[in-house]
Amino acid sequence: MDTNNCFHCGLDIVKDEIIFEARHFCCNGCKTVYAIFSENGLMSYYDFENAPGATPSGGSKYNFLENEQIVEKLLDFNEGDTQIISLQIPHIHCSSCIWILENLNRLQKDIVSSQVDFHQKKVRITYNSSSVSLKEIVDLLCAIGYEPYISLDDYGTQKIKTNRSLTYKLGVAFFCFGNIMLLSFPEYFEVNEFWLDQYKNFFRGLIFLLALPSFFYSASGYYVAAWKSIRAKMLNIEIPIALGIVVMFVRSSIDMLFNYGSGFFDSLTGLVFFMLLGKMFQIKTYSFLSFERDYKSYFPVAVTRLKTDGLEESVPIYEIQKGDRLLIRNQELIPADSILIASNASIDYSFVTGEAIPVSKKSGDKLFAGGKQLGNAIEMEVLQPVSQSYLTQLWSNEIFEKKTSANYKSITDTISRYFTPALLLIAFSGLGYWILIDINIAFNVFTAVLIVACPCALALTAPFTLGNILRILGRQKCYLKNACVIEQLAKVDTIVFDKTGTITTSSRSNITYEGKTFSASENEMVKSTLSGSNHPLSRMLYDFLPEAERLRVAFFAEISGKGIEAKINGDSISIGSADFIGKPLRKDSLKTSVHIDINGNYFGHFTFNNEYRNGLRELFAELKKNYELKLLSGDNDGERPLLQKMLPAGTQMVFNQMPEQKLQFIENLQKQGKNVLMIGDGLNDAGALAQSNVGISLAENVNVFSPACDAILDAGEFRKINSFLQLSKNAMLVIKMSFGLSLLYNVVGLSFALSGNLQPLVAAIIMPLSTVSIVSFVTIMSNFYARKLKIQTKSEA
Amino acid sequence: MSVIYLLISISICVAIGFFIAFIRAVRSGQYDDDYTPSVRMLFDDELRTKPENPVETKQKQI
């Protein structure tokens, strides 16, 4: 193990190294977790993976779990002595995690069993509530660095059963297809043999029986979809498919019954199987991500309410009423708009705005829901219940009610609008022509056309191409909600960016200093003072300052929301906001700054500038060639001149936008006939993301927070947005090319059909041949385009 | 040649047997999580007996 990294969590050891049992740790938290594991003989945790752990966060936020009513709503199963709970644990990331979480009963005997679902990042714990409470379990998880994420979303919602019907259908289809293929072989090769004649009826009877489940069960989804589209007066791809399947079944049954031939059951079941396979392939879900999040996923289940007699109680969040007094502790979320009472607060609005730097508030200030308190516990009085708060009201907008996919037409549907009438025309003209010659042949031709033209390959093209692209993008950390998003991405012509948190990074801030230069000893003093504070600004500043000796701090006080005071070797130091130091606030200082004062002498201030993401300028320049670009921001226009210099000319910038205004801005663009891609990050973009044709949510950590959207993009891959857009356009190109290819097969098949020579063998060859070649064509082509783009991004990086 | 009735009947029965096994596997949720079990099976059972002799555990670690 590298001595510069923590044995438990693997982070660099920057400050004080702690050595315990000859291992190095970055902090006390990590050491404590190690001690717990080593005491209980769970050391194998460190064998599976190097430094797999997480630093436990101090302090319990889970007092509400003492409330029986709340616990009951969270449980999956609750009867007698057996309780089952599923907890979402974002830290689950490796085999060590699985191991430790499945051995929880080593640490707490009353846990009966625990099972991890790695993809969903969930652990399902069975325990006995008479001997251990849920709170104790959650505290245990926190203590070992696996803090569960319990939000309002888990509260009292019905657990959704996973839908396995497609798996069943696929299994049935494969079973029927495989057996029918085997039973059909004699007919393919030995046409006029004696033994075949003898056993023909037995074979055919079996084939017929085997075809029934495939026809009635596996293919049932297509009949329903076709019926729906007929009722909606739309010609989509399901109509010719359903028509083909039904005609195939009827014709084959008649053939068999009257001993005309062996029928097309082999092709029929094969077709159903391949199409279901395509459907399965297209459904690639990232089950650990949630694309449907609303404010509920962000909000806690319960908060602490102060009763009139000063006692604390946990209440479910929906029960909060106007006038209630709440106690919000360090790191807790403000659930409702309220007024701050007593003491100062430092509120982190990063969920809402994406802005990492906390805002300080004074007593009497209004606090908006969605902020997070950093520092001491604060008291506040509720102004609006949760559902009527400024932020949550956004979700009452109708855009969150409707599902956008309903009015959206896919490329396959567009093509089938021409395909279906053309097919019917050919079928009827074939019938018309042959009916004058021979009525039997005419009927055969008519059905053969519908069978052979059944757009199996056509229907497979899009699922396989899009499914493949979906996986390629997933590997690049761009997670799409479903395959339709790719088609919509390809149509985009306008891109709207959010500013804060989207084109600026919230994790890294650029710090500049103005004022007197520090001597080495003064630097030591400032740094030693900062080391005592957990405030994010202090930490950023601490990392920014040059390395220095640690001095003994004689006196230390942190005044929440204002600053810190310390005494070192008789010198007094104050670090904090302008009014804390006693400097008048400068007019132009819209930016966050920290002022330094030593022994009453004002030194200067550090300014925290937003830093723009790497490659922003290049990305905008590339995008400008093909797209109309817009910038939306909730901030003031202080950075307009800088942005104008940085971004290509003609980029429209709109500042001071409220969440509803952002939504309307997108709506107006759409009214002008634009296809809008919105890229945002915070909850304040949620409305705009939902309204836009495609909403991409940028996330620093994809596992934790993102508002409802169509795609989640890892913030580190921001630079690749143009490549992703190109890839989606290429995907459409691949689909169009393979449409051409599958039409070619149709023409060949139709020429057999129209001349009245469609043998079951020919159908049985054309069908899989076209399917396999189309599937391999689209896979190779989409991989080819992806590789081309990947190389491109690599060389530019 | 009438043995073919018997053979095919047997083969179909075997196929149905596997098919039922598949359905039961899906129903019991085996296809819901296709990753975790593959990791879980690699954990050694003997690791679970370690708490009884913690001294040995430490030696192994060093």
Image (spheres, coloured by chain):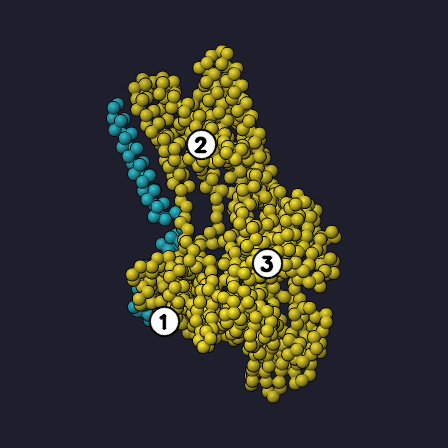
Chain colours: A yellow, B cyan
Report whether A655 appears left or right of A125: right
> Nearest the camera: A499 or A43?
A499
The earlier-in-sequence mark between 1 and 2 is: 1
Q: Mark 1 and 3 residues: CB-CB less than 8 Å, in contact?
A: no
| Residue where numbered disc 2 is placed | A271
Q: Callout 3, which amino acid?
A: Asn
Q: Callout 2, which amino acid?
A: Leu
The earlier-in-sequence mark between 3 and 2 is: 2
Disc ID at residue A684: 3
Disc ID at residue A39: 1
From this view, report whether residue A330 is shown above or below residue A724: below
Helix, strand or loop status at disc 3: helix
Tell me residue B13's x, y (percent): 28, 34
Helix, strand or loop status at disc 1: helix
Alpha carbon separation for disc pair 3 and 2? 47 Å
Q: Is residue A16 visible?
A: yes
Q: Chain of mark 3?
A: A
| Mark 1 burial class by Cα count in 10 Å: few <14, some 14-19, many 20+ | few
Q: Callout 1, which amino acid?
A: Glu
Task: Specify whether disc 3 shares its chain with disc 2.
Answer: yes
Q: Chain of mark 2?
A: A
